[in-house]
Amino acid sequence: QSKRTKIRSVILTIIDYLIFGLYMVGVLGIGFYHFLKNKSTEDYYVGSRSIKASHVGLSIVATDVGGGFSIGLGGVGFMMGLAGSWLLFTGLVGAWLTAVFIIPKIKRIDAKHKFLTYPDFLRHRYNGKVALVAALISGIGYLGFTGAQMLAGAKLASATILQNNPFGMNPITFALLIIAVVTILYTVIGGLKAVIYTDTIQWILLLSGLIFVTIPATLIKIGGISALRENLPPEYFSLTNISPVTFINWMVTIIPIWLIGMTLYQRMYACKDEKEAKKAWYIAGFFEYPIMAFTGVFLGMCARVVFPEAEAEMALPMLIRDVLPLGVTGIVIASYFSAIMSTADSCLMASSGNFVNDIIERYFIKNISAKASIRLSMIATLIIGAFAVIIAAQFNTVLNAILYAYAFMVSGLFVPTLGAYFWKKASSAGALAGMLTGGILTLLLLTKFLTLPDCIAKLQLDASVYGILSSAVTFIGVSILWPDKVGVNRSLISTEEEITC
């Protein structure tokens, strides 16, 4: 009987590997199919502006939460319980605020100017110098975010299917290299349509696998909710088990990304009209919170019961590896990998779009053909992907890598972009000064080249808080002292509404 059990286990494990392999081939096949259909940069970067709200909404969730935040969210649930769900409450707030206040403005102006990137909007509102700085900050920030996704994939792989390797390498290092090769390959051959359509499938599979398979299997393994309560501290079941400073840091660091995220602007442009775009953002917010927020932290709590001594972000991958029924593991792990790949794909495309469309083709290689532009984007993506691997190797936790990338972008770009939408007196000089001040200060604080006085450091606020404050002061002051010339200050309100009147 024991021999039969072992044989059955081996057969089912092989089935897991086959399912995982076939799923990956299928995802890459979809990417290659759309690659063959891409005829222009508009096809490649904004999906021909014809994608439905349901696909865009699920793609936003897959990109924003994806595998990286899923692994990170499990780690937060492992460390603090249900209160970790506040991490994705930021997604609900950010998505719905964007739907109400930003999308009506950007879709109205995009209908006329046909933007491809986030800096395109800033170039229209301010000038080319502001757009160039924004492209640099956004491109570098998404480079870091891509590295975080690759690290998430490496952690999942090293704890599941790539525990051992024939080269004797560190499991995470070996897994990181494997994930990088697959992710970069998929990114190079795919466009936004491929990303969005595969995101839809991947997200449905991932969420279904977690809710309908992983959670029930885990509860059976640990003995139900009662066993969960017995093995975890009481504060793990309270939404107030979070320090005010942590809550503030999450809100300040993450919510503004919805205003300045290149991946989000690409999806705004990809929707055919304002109604579809707003619907997509409402869908995204709902799936982030409460659905994925509580699913992720709950599984992290379960993982703590099963693997109390594990490293926080490794516990969830270990749970998937050991708790799921054989034959099902391959599907869930493939879904996780797909979500990670899709997020990395989107971020690599965003970074590539910033460097290619907003810098290289605008200042170095002009009047390039559509076919040559796509090839250039692929080369840039390959190089950016290599740098992302190097960045990924510098971090120990996925969540820290994500929040560092967010903080860098938010500090430099949030205030000038907010001013572009809502303050008529916002000037190009003010925007440029605000971007440089906020971005540089945050970068110096994050890299420890600059330290805060003890009386301020003890507040434990994120570096982005100080970056945003310094950016705001500089932006407002310089805009007042050095306003744009008459006719240059193109407020969205005055340009699109007052002229019409």
Image (cartoon, rainbow, N blue to C red):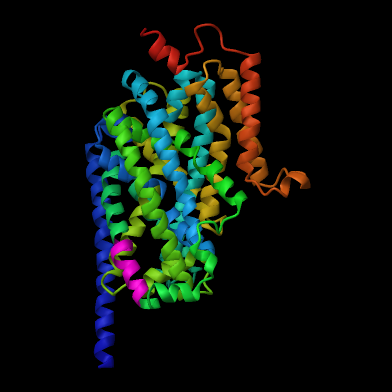
Image position of 188 with respect to 374: above or below: below
Q: Nearer the viewer, residue 459 or 439?
A: 459
Residue 99 position, x and y percent, is 38, 33
Residue, far bottom: 1
Q: Residue at x 77, y 46 (%)?
A: 455
Residue, far right: 454
Q: Residue at x 31, y 69 (%)?
A: 329
**Magenta residue span:** 209-220
Residue 262 position, x and y percent, is 43, 35
Q: Is residue 159 visible?
A: no
Q: Is residue 466 magenta?
A: no
Query: In which quadrant of the rendered view does residue 213 lie?
Result: bottom left
Residue 191 position, x and y percent, is 31, 40
Residue 175 position, x and y percent, is 44, 63
Q: Main secondary structure of the magenta part?
A: helix
Image position of 431 with respect to 441: above or below: above
Image position of 437 with respect to 1: above or below: above
Question: Looking at the rendering, in which quadrant would you find the N terminus?
Answer: bottom left
Q: Is residue 213 magenta?
A: yes
Query: In which quadrant of the rendered view does residue 335 lie?
Result: bottom left
Q: Is residue 70 visible?
A: yes
Q: How many marks?
A: 0
Question: Looking at the rendering, in which quadrant would you find the C terminus?
Answer: top left
